[in-house]
Amino acid sequence: MPSPAPDSDLATLPDLRPPQRRVAALLPSPSQVEWLLHLGLLPLTLAQVVFTQQPGPHPELLSASLVVASLAWVGWLWVWPWRSETFGGSTRAALLLVVIAFASGFATLVDGPGWSANLLAGAVLEAGARARWRTASGVLLSGGLGLATGGWLLGRAAIGIFGQLPTELYVVFYLFLCGCLLLTGLARGLRREQLAQARLLLSQRQDVMAARERAAALGERSRIAREIHDILAHSLADLAIQLELADALLSDSGDRSGALERVRHAHRLASDGLEETRRAIHALRSDAPPLPEALAAMVNAYHRSGSSVDLQVEGSPRPLAAASGLAMLRTAQEALANSHQHAAGQPVHVGLSYQPGRVALSVRSGTRMSQSPGPRKDGGPPPPAAVGGGYGLAGMRERLLLVGGTLAAGPGRDGWSVIAEVPG
């Protein structure tokens, strides 16, 4: 007899500890237990027939039919479909069930009503539970034909569990029991298919959830990487430019005061970069402060650096999505940095307006800003332009588009303005 294939039920075991898993692997699976029950039904039936059934008029026919039914039963167990819960496509299994049903049905009545009906009941039940409807119907009809043939050979009267009754009544009784067992098997098979579909849907849902979690994790990593990259690229690039200028002043003209001023400015840039990094990390957390508070902290930082910046909030503040709030904060940061570089000393106005269905941010400088930085009035080198991945108008517009927002920037009558809007 072929050894059973590893049962799929072990794959669904919970994450047990190694000793518990080894013990669970030694226990028989549900399919193996069911196979053993079917194996034990054959000797049990033969023992009942030999030791309890009264001899009738056709013992030789009873013995022959039991031999055929037993051989077919063993053959059916041999081709048991271990790897599938149905054998509707297995022709050998279906034919063996038909033979079992006919031979056991014939043996049930040919020598008087007896225990051979156990094999008939098992065949009909398994046909209903595991085979297609046509195969199950064929097994039931084959069993009914065997009952009718055996009853016809037995004669018009039979002595069985109900005493001496017409053989036709016993045929009807066994057919009724087989019909009930067939319906029970069909219900069992339907339940098995539903469980299989439920397991498949659960597996697919788990795969979808895992894919969503991976996508969310990758998106969050990309967002964090973009924030840190923008801040570091912006700060370190400005820092490198200032240090290069200091080196040039010392090497070319020996201007120690100018070089010292550049070093001090580089120190301020480094401090501002660290502060921006702290604010970015804080904004990425779930307990990030509301947008008005974050803008107020940013304006105060520019105040401490000597810039003239004021903040005005209109409307009733309300919470924004984390991505939208961070995009608005980064837009204000870039606009203030550009104002500080391209219009140093000019007043800057920051406005935050909460309107129905949207939130608007405006940053306006007090004078027109040139498209490119020009020389300073004191004759020193021009301030560095904004650099770094994601900074500038293109970076601001990209950030806002990711959250469904818009950006408008350009010169106007009152100076350079940047206006950003996000839904919320």
Image (tube, rainbow, N blue to C red):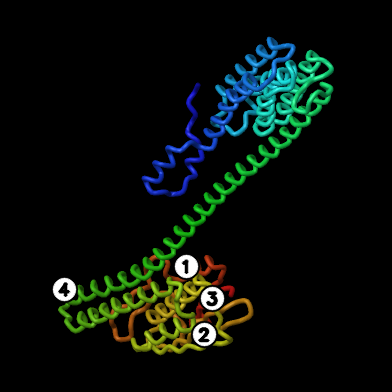
Instruction: Say which mark, if any, is on residue 57.
Output: none
Q: Amino acid at mark 3?
A: Leu
The CA distance from mark 3 to mark 2 is 16 Å
The CA distance from mark 1 to mark 3 is 23 Å
Q: Which is nearer the N-term, disc 4 or disc 3?
A: 4
Residue name at image x 41 percent, y 65 percent: 224
In which image quadrant can residue 333 be found?
bottom left
Instruction: Say which mark, if any, is on residue 251.
Output: 4
Is residue 195 placed above or below 114 in the rendered structure?
Answer: below
In this rendering, which labeled residue sits more in front, label 4 or label 2? 2
The CA distance from mark 1 to mark 2 is 21 Å
The residue that mark 1 highlights is 394
In which image quadrant can residue 53 be found?
top right
Helix, strand or loop for disc 1: helix
In this rendering, which labeled residue sits more in front, label 1 or label 3? 3
> Whole-percent x and y of residue 49?
65, 21
Q: Which is nearer the N-term, disc 1 or disc 3?
A: 3
Residue name at image x 39 percent, y 80 percent: 342
Residue name at image x 43 percent, y 75 percent: 334
The residue that mark 3 highlights is 320
